Every structure is written in C-alpha cells, then in structure tokens.
Image (cartoon, rainbow, N blue to C red):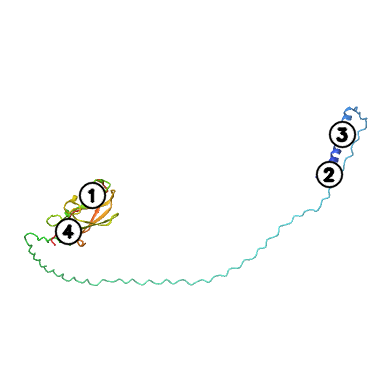
Amino acid sequence: MGQGSSRIYNLISLIFLILTIIVIVLVVMQFFAPPVTPPAAAVIVPTALELPSVTPSNTPTATLPPTLTFTPTNTLTPTETLPPTVTPTVSPTITDTPGPTDTPTVTPTPSTSPTPTPTATPTGPTNTPPPTLSPFLYDLRDGQIIFTQNFANTAGCAWQGIGGQVFDINSAAVTGMQVRITGPGVGERFVITGSNSLYGAGGWEQPVDNVINGNTYYVELLSAGGTPISPRIEVTFPLDCSRNLALVNFVQVRAQ
C-alpha cells in the first residue's frame, strides 16, 4: 500500500487510543467521586400518550369468480340404416351313389419253370498253370538280404558296406559281371564280380559309409556289356553295428 494510506491508518489508531484514555479516566473519576443524593421532588405523572387513530384505506370488496360459458356441441346427424342382409338358402348336398363293383377276372396259373440240368463236374486234379518266367536272367538268391556284422575288414563299426556273390543256374560262381550300387554318399558305383574273394569265388564288395546309418541303397546286376540282367534290389540298413554288412547274392533263375 502507499504512504498516504499508512498515514490514514495511523491517524485512526491515534484517535482510538485518545478515546480509550478518556474512557479510562472517566471510569476512575466515577469510582472515586462521592455518591450524589437526589433532591426530593414531586412525583411527576407522565401525560398519557394519545395515539392517532388509523384511517382505514380502501375497503376490499369480494369479487365473484367469472361464470363459465359452455360452447354448444355439434348435433350428430343420424346415420342411414342399412337394409338387412339376405341369408342365402343352402342347397341340398348331392350324394354320390357307388355303381356296381367289377367282378375280378380269373388269375392265370403260372406255368412250370423248367429245371436246369446240372453240368458235369470234371474229376481229377486241377491243372496248375506254369509259373511266370522272370524277365531277368538273375534274381536275389532265396529272395532275401542277409544283414550281418562286418567280417571282411578290421574297421568294425567304423564301416558300413554291401557285398555278396553271383551264381549261375548250376550254383557255380560267376565272375566278370558288373554290380551297380547307388545311394546317398555313394552316388553311382560299379564293382566287378570275383574282385573280392573274402565273399567267395564270385565275391564283390562296396563300402557305403565309415559310420553306421539307416540309409537306403539300390543294387543291380549288369552283364559284361552293361545291360541290366536282374531287378533293382532295395537295401535299407537297420542302424545297428552288429548288422552293418548287407549280403546281396544273385543267382541265375532261367537258362539264356
């Protein structure tokens, strides 16, 4: 706030201070002053105060509520009375009288069916057709692959391979033919029969891996000129160290 406002507040405070001191002085003087005895005086009877009479203002008159006037309603025009509806007379129902029933005709008697004459059954043994000749000159001996433990080298289970022999129709060893081996890790390999005498006179061998696996390989016998003369034999290893050598032996099944 400004300096002028401070002066006003100071002046007001000073006034109240002076008034307070005056009141204190009067109270002290009244306390120490001797009591004053009032003089005897005649009792003054106060004059009765006459109040002016109230002149009534406008006198309210009772006002009656307005009377409601009803508007006459429209008079309904009488409607035209329709003539009574004529009820049609029901015609009599016609009943169909059934005619005479047709007499059934005579059912013809079926004729006797002829009894078939049984054919004569031939006696004696049934002719057995000759076996179908194989289109190949050689086939898998005894129709099976023999799985055994590696005996042809000292590699043991660090080796896996396929080997075998080839025999003619008289069970004599056959040499000089080709054996084709295909499969994973081998590609296509050719081995000459009679190249490994550890399997016999017509023996052959083809390693396929230096570990045991369960892969599938195919073996096929070819003539010296490279013509397939046996079906393609599928060889799937059992993933067993004690059967890591597959013996595939071929034998001649028919004469040339």
Report x, y in % for residue 243.
23, 47
Earlier sequence position, callout 3 versus callout 2? 2
**Mark 3 against mark 1, which lies toward the viewer?**
1
As measured in the structure, the alpha-carbon distance from the residue carrying label 3 to the one carrying label 2 is 27 Å
Q: Which amino acid type is marked by label 3? A: Ile
Quadrant the N terminus occupies: top right
In front of the other: 145 or 206: 206
Mark 2 surroundings within 10 Å by alpha-carbon count, few (fewer than 14), some (14 through 19), many (20 or more): few
Q: Are marks 3 and 2 in contact (CB under 8 Å)?
A: no
> Does label 1 or label 2 sit earlier along the sequence?
2
Checking the image for residue 138, the label placed there is: 4
- Tag 1: amino acid: Leu
Mark 3 → mark 1, Cα distance in angstroms: 138 Å
Q: Earlier in the sequence, mark 2 or mark 4?
A: 2
CA gap, disc 3 and disc 4? 153 Å
Q: Position of residue 138 (x, y in %)?
A: 17, 58
Q: Nearer the viewer, mark 3 or mark 4?
A: 4
Dot 1 corresponds to which residue? 245
Question: Nearer the observer, disc 2 or disc 4?
Answer: 4
Amino acid on which the number 2 mark rests in the picture:
Gln
* Residue at which label 2 appears: 3
- State the image quarter where residue 95 is shown: bottom left
- 96 shown above or below 180: below
The structure residue drawn at horizontal position 84% and vertical position 40%, both measured from the top left corner, is: 10
Q: Tag on residue 147?
A: none
Q: In which quadrant of the rendered view does residue 249 lie?
A: bottom left
Q: Find disc 3 in the rendering and name its residue.
A: 21
Instruction: Measuring from the top left, give residue 104's x and y in whole percent.
Output: 18, 70
**Element carrying mark 2:** helix
Residue 45 position within the rendered picture, expressed as x and y whole percent measured from the top left? 90, 36
